[in-house]
Amino acid sequence: MKVKAAVVNGVNTNYSFESLNLAELQHDEVRVRIVATGICHSDDALRLGHAGFGFPAVLGHEGAGIVEQVGSSVNHIAKGDHVVLAYAYCSHCNHCLEGIPAACTDWLSLNWGSLRKDGSAFFTKDDGTAVSNFFHQSSFSTYTNVKVSNVIKVEKDLDLRILGPLGCGLMTGVGTIVNGLQAKPGSSIVILGTGAVGLAAMMAAKIAGCSTIIAVDIHDSRLALSKELGATHTINSKNTDVLERVREITNQVGVNYSIDTTGISDVMKLSLDVLAIRGVAAPIAVTNHDLVLNTLNDLVISSKKMIGVLMGATIPQLTIPKMIEFYKNGDFPFDKLIQFYPFEEINQASADSLSGKTIKPVLILDPNYSV
């Protein structure tokens, strides 16, 4: 079938709208009509060449929509179901069976592989050119085919226009707190960068009972929102020495946990420096920047840890319903981060995200949708 998609044809090029051919549905896939999708920093990181990827490509991996068709082996999702889309996983490797699908043995081939496992393309141009897929989802398209493991069914009275970001950025922030750092009540944390991921982590830290939550950013407007959403302290790193201020706040002890969402080398190093003895840092940005450490001074002497946490180490089918529950209870008001854009304004939405003007841009692909 023909779909309208925002295509990236090369590194550091804008999105361009094209009519593509969507492949036939395979037995274990679900076809979804995309209602809305978030733009995640990872989309622009790939587009700008910060992480290797094959172009042309349809990016997008924070989709929400309505099921149009299911493959022959799909038995728990049906046409008309409302769904949020997250990452794909195999469901049968040791890590998946242990309940850690973000560590799936096939994670890279499923989510970063561009083509299906059998080598076929998800999308093609009329001249036969294969167009790469992202996250087995490619939600910057009016319709897309996804794996069953991508799909999280949600209640039909929920607004699909706000739910897409739960599938990546927000889930990553929440999961890093809950699963990665396993933050304890009464603990302290520094969150470096208060975009969507950082603010989601901050709200999760509040839910987890952290008593000292320090938000660091260069935008006063974001720091004000951080205060509103649960930060106990805010630091503008443009005009304040972050390490000195954190030590002042913590009586020279440092914090138990830190999260870096910026991917900037100096800031990633700072995420270690602000830690207390036995503190744990989680750098979770998609970045092309390196980090240089002296393992003795930066880790060993103070028994510090730096851990990798992919996608918040979540099980999306469990985590997303839990985030929706937090939202309903008023504990996770993630809708305050969202600004809507028509699909046709994807390049403006991307620019506003990169400049910091918009925390979480959401593209509306179906303007006729209503709850």
Image (cartoon, helix red, strand yellow):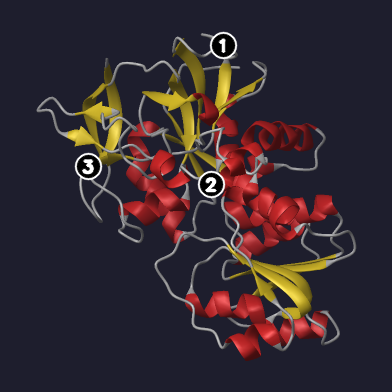
For the residues bearing labels 2 and 1, Cβ distance under 8 angstroms: no
User: Label 2 vs label 1: CA separation?
Assistant: 34 Å
Q: Nearer the viewer, mark 2 or mark 1?
A: 1
Q: Position of residue 162 (x, y in %)?
A: 59, 33
The residue closer to the viewer here, 349 or 53, is: 53
Determine crowd level at label 2: few under 14, some 14-19, many 20+ residues with C-alpha closer than 10 A.
many
Residue at left 36%, top 46%?
A: 348
Q: Decide: is 67 above or below 343.
A: above
Mark 3, secondary structure of its residue: loop
User: Label 3 vs label 1: CA separation?
Assistant: 33 Å
> Total marks drawn?
3
Q: Position of residue 169 (x, y in %)?
A: 56, 47
The residue closer to the viewer here, 49 or 12, is: 49
Residue that carries the numbered disc 2 in the rendered image? 360
User: Label 3 vs label 2: CA separation?
Assistant: 25 Å
- What type is the residue that disc 1 sits on? Asn
Residue at left 49%, top 59%?
A: 356
- What type is the residue that disc 2 sits on? Lys
Q: Decide: is 185 above or below 322.
A: below
Residue that carries the numbered disc 3 in the rendered image? 56
Is 261 positioned to the left or the right of 342 in the image?
Answer: right
- Tell me the tag on residue 75: 1
Q: Position of residue 310 (x, y in %)?
A: 56, 53
Specify the quadrant of the image occupied by residue 129. top left
